[in-house]
Image (cartoon, rainbow, N blue to C red):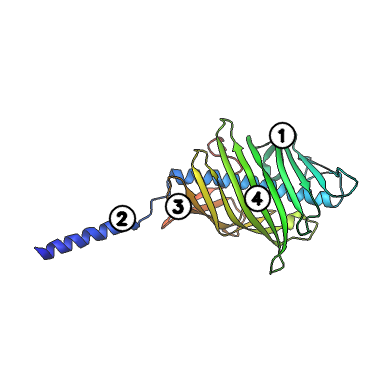
Amino acid sequence: MKTKTLILFLALAGLIMTSCSKSDPIDTKATDSADDVALSESLYDDAFASLEIATVFAEVGKKSASTLDSCPLITINSPGEDFFPRNIVIDYGTGCTGLFDVERSGKILITLSGPRGTTGSERILTFDNYYVNGAKVEGTFTIENLGPNPDQNAVFAVSLAGGKITFPDSKVITREFTRQREYIAGYGTWNPWDDECLITGMSAGTTLDGKTYTLTITSPLQWSATCRFLKGGTIGFDVEGIEPFVLNYGEGECDALATLSRGDETKEITLRYWHPKYHDK
C-alpha cells in the first residue's frame, strides 16, 4: 500500500512540475502589447531617420531642400551670426505620402548645437502637430555625440522624454527611453542612406490598454537607413499582467516580420506604420 501511495505521489508531483514549467501560449494580450510597442518603435525610428537626413542638409549649408520628392520641405537657418546653432523645420504640411509610403503631416523641429561629428554636440528634436497615418506623435528627443568607442565607432546617447502616440479615439501609447546608437557603417559620409547602427538600452511606458511596460534590449537592435523596419535584435518584454516574452526582429533581413517567443511558444507578427486596431489595411 505504501509503495502504491508513493508511486501515485511521484506521478502527481511530476505532473504538477511539468504544468508549472510549461509557459503560457502567446495570447492576444501579448500580441496586442507587441503591436503597440513595435508601432511606437517604428514611428520614433522614422523620426530619427528624418533627423539624420535633415542634419546632412544643415551641415552642408543649405537653407532649404526636399528629400526624394516634395514631401517634406526642409527649412534651415542660423539664428545668430555664427553657423551654429542651426534650426531645422521639416514641414509635411497638411499631409503628404513620402518615404516608405507613409502619410505624414505637421512639423518636426530640430536644433543643432554644433556639427554632428563633434564630441559633446547635441541635437534636440520636437514635434509640432505631427501625425503619422492619422496618429499624433509627441515627445522630445535629445541626441548627444559621445565620441568613438574602443572599436572607433561613433556612439550617440539618445533619449526620448514625454513620448506619446494618440489615436483618433483619444487612446494613447506612452514611451520613454535611454539608449545608445553605435554607427557600424556610413558614419562620416555625406550620404544619410548608408548609415547603419546597433541600438542598446531600455524603455518604458504604457500600452493602448493602459498597462505599464518595461523593455530591455537583450541583443542589439539592427537599424539601417534604407530598411523600412528594424532588421535584427531582440527585446525582452515585461508588461503588467502578462508573462514576460521576447520580440525578435530577425537576423539581418530587411522585411516586415518579427517573432514573439515565450519558452517553446512562438508567434509571427507583421510590422507596420499603422495600428491594426485603427486600420483595415
Q: Position of residue 183 (x, y in %)?
A: 70, 61
Q: Judging from the image, what secondary structure is the residue with disc 4 in?
A: strand
Q: Measure the alpha-carbon separation of dots 4 and 2.
A: 41 Å
Q: Which residue is mark 4?
A: 159
The answer to whether mark 4 and mark 3 are in CB contact below 8 A is: no
Residue 244's label in the rendered image is 3
Q: Of label 4 and label 3, which has the lower sequence position?
A: 4
Residue at position x 54%, y 39% in the image: 276
Which label number is shown at residue 140? none
Residue 119 shows up from this direction:
yes
The amino acid on which the numbered mark 4 sits, given as a three-letter code, is Ser
Badge 2: residue crowd in 10 Å (few <14, some 14–19, many ≥20): few
Q: Determine whether label 4 and label 1 are within 8 Å by CB.
A: no
Disc number lying in front (2 or 3): 3
How far, Cα to Cα, is label 4 from label 1? 27 Å
Q: Which mark is nearer the camera, 4 or 2?
A: 4
For disc 1, the marked residue is 95
Task: Please report whichever mark, 4 or 2, sits nearer to the chain's N-terminal start.
Answer: 2
As drawn, 168 above or below 41: above
Label 4 vs 1, first from the N-terminus = 1
In the image, what residue type sits under mark 2?
Ser
Q: What count of labels does the image hold?
A: 4
Tag 1 and tag 3, C-beta contact below 8 Å: no
Residue 280 seen in the figure: no
Residue drawn at x 46%, y 53% as measured from the top left: 245
For marks 1 and 2, the one nearer the N-term is 2
Q: What whole-number distance in Å separates the C-alpha atoms at marks 1 and 3? A: 38 Å
Determine crowd level at label 3: few under 14, some 14-19, many 20+ residues with C-alpha closer than 10 A.
some
SS for dot 1: loop
Q: Position of residue 111 (x, y in %)?
A: 77, 46
